């Protein structure tokens, strides 16, 4: 049994900047070219980078480590965050489409976290769910170049939805920082 007093030693893989998660040459979020041009490209770049950050925080862990609720009494785990974000992406997609909304992926409230168990099939399904739900909403939003356009049953502006998605991922990347450090001691941005 892991106790809160069983603190792993803090470590980082980075050697160039020891407070970072990875060295610049190994970081998929780094580019040598100019930054994105325009508001839409900038928002998409931030969203992409936060999505990558979450994945990076989960890399190299076993199903048991991904499912570990390492900050009691919270029910959060890294695997739970992956499942939660898949659920949230589906929910956002439901906001901007017409017709009947798709059902929840995991059922009742908090099932995304409660069902995050240490099983490779659950891990694989969570990643597949997240990729599918991200692709679905990305494809729908790609039809709108006007960020002020109000869409769907929620009549939400495309800009507002993009910013909300960035905020959600950014907040959960902060949670992932703490969860990962408690799991195996790895730290970094």
Image (tube, rainbow, N blue to C red):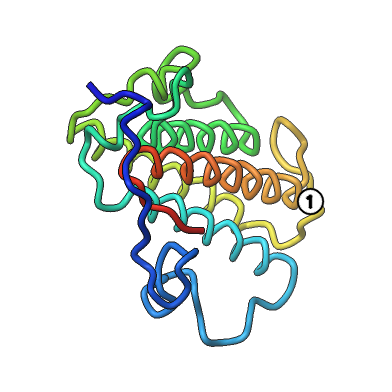
Rendering coords of residue 3 (x, y %): 32, 23
128 in relation to 95, above or below: below
- Seen as rendered, the residue at the extreme front is 5
Rendering coords of residue 21 (x, y %): 43, 62
Tell me where residue 165 sits by quadrant: top right
SS at mark 1 in the image: loop
Q: Is residue 97 left or right of residue 149?
A: left
Q: Measuring 76% from the left and 39% from the top, which residue is drawn there?
A: 156
Q: Measuring 45% from the left and 68% from the top, which residue is drawn there?
A: 18
Rendering coords of residue 131 (x, y %): 38, 47
Q: Is residue 50 left or right of residue 26?
A: right
Q: Measuring 67% from the left and 67% from the top, which residue is drawn there?
A: 42
Q: Nearer the viewer, residue 85 or 141?
A: 85
Tell me the quadrant of the picture where the N terminus can be found.
top left
Rendering coords of residue 151 (x, y %): 73, 42
Q: Measuring 45% from the left and 50% from the top, which residue is drawn there?
A: 54
User: What residue sits right under mark 1 in the picture?
Assistant: 149
């Amino acid at each position: 049994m892991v106790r809160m007093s069983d603190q792993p030693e803090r470590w980082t893989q980075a050697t160039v900047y020891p407070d970072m998660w990875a060295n610049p040459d190994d970081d998929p979020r780094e580019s040598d070219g100019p930054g994105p041009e325009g508001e839409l490209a900038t928002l998409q770049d931030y969203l992409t980078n936060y999505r990558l950050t979450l994945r990076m925080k989960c890399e190299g862990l076993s199903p048991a480590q991904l499912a570990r609720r390492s900050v009691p009494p919270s029910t959060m785990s890294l695997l739970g965050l992956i499942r939660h974000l898949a659920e949230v992406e589906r929910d956002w997609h439901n906001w901007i489409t017409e017709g009947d909304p798709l059902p929840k992926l995991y059922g009742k409230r908090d099932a995304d976290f409660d069902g995050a168990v240490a099983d490779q099939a659950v891990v694989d399904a969570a990643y597949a769910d997240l990729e599918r739900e991200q692709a679905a909403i990305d494809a729908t939003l790609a039809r709108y170049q006007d960020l002020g356009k109000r869409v769907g049953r929620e009549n939400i502006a495309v800009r507002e939805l993009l910013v909300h998605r960035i905020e959600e991922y950014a907040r959960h990347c902060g949670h992932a920082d703490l969860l990962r450090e408690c799991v195996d001691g790895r730290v970094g941005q």
